[in-house]
Image: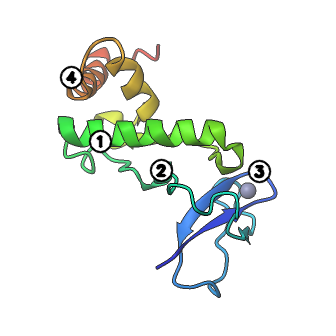
């Protein structure tokens, strides 16, 4: 199935796999209004394909193989590449934080790839960073710092 770009009047843009060009455009994930499909951009043609959209990254702890280091490292790099791509190509910017996990102990305070990257950048690898984020939530309890 082809992937198309969609845009909403609220400024949200996203990519989605749809059965065909004639498929109806989906509603905006941010505001629920109908979107319109954007024509393929000639500026992008011929260059390397952009990194996968953030919404393609796993958004659950289970999807990250319960914090498997290699899995997390792979997706953290993918998300970082996407963020860099979006900073250079603002028209592709997605108005959302990429969530890495939201269930279980992450239900109250979802784990974002941004947090993973921040934790990992202080010298730990991604697996340790994820384990620490998980531990913070199980022991920190009610703290909302
Ligand atoms: Zn919208």
> In this view of the protein, can residue 54 be seen by the observer?
yes
Name the disc covering residue 74, or none.
1
Q: Earlier in the sequence, mark 2 or mark 4?
A: 2
Spatial CA span between label 2 and label 4: 25 Å
- Mark 3 CB near ligand 1 (8 Å cut): yes
Which structural element holds mark 1? helix
Name the disc covering residue 11, or none.
3
Name the disc covering residue 51, or none.
2
Spatial CA span between label 1 and label 3: 29 Å
State how the image is colored: rainbow
Q: Decide if residue 96 is on the left or right side of residue 90.
A: left
Spatial CA span between label 3 and label 4: 36 Å
Question: Circle 4 is placed at which residue position?
Answer: 128
Residue located 61% across and 58% down the image: 14
From the top left corner, tell me how far across and down residue 49 is, in percent.
50, 57
Q: Decide if residue 145 is on the left or right side of residue 124.
A: right
From the top left corner, tell me how far across and down residue 92 is, in percent.
65, 50
Name the disc covering residue 109, or none.
none
Q: Earlier in the sequence, mark 1 or mark 4?
A: 1
* Circle 1 residues within 10 Å: few <14, some 14–19, many ≥20: few
Nearer the observer: mark 1 or 3; the answer is: 1
Q: Earlier in the sequence, mark 3 or mark 4?
A: 3
Decide: marks 1, 3 in contact (CB < 8 A)?
Answer: no
* Circle 3 residues within 10 Å: few <14, some 14–19, many ≥20: some
Decide: marks 1, 4 in contact (CB < 8 A)?
Answer: no
Q: Earlier in the sequence, mark 2 or mark 3?
A: 3
Nearer the observer: mark 1 or 4; the answer is: 1
Which structural element holds mark 3? loop
């Amino acid at each position: 199935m082809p992937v198309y770009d969609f845009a909403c009047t609220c400024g949200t843009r996203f990519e989605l796999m749809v059965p065909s060009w004639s498929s109806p455009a989906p509603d905006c994930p941010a505001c629920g209004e109908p979107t319109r499909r954007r024509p393929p951009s000639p500026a992008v043609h011929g260059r390397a394909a952009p990194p996968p959209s953030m919404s393609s990254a796993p958004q659950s702890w289970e999807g990250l193989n319960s914090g498997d280091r290699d899995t997390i490292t792979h997706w953290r790099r993918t998300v970082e590449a996407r963020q860099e791509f979006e900073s250079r190509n603002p028209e592709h910017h997605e108005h959302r934080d990429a969530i890495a996990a939201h269930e279980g102990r992450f239900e109250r305070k979802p784990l974002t790839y941004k947090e993973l990257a921040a934790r990992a950048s202080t010298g730990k690898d991604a697996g340790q960073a994820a384990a620490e984020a998980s531990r913070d939530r199980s022991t920190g309890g009610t703290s909302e710092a």
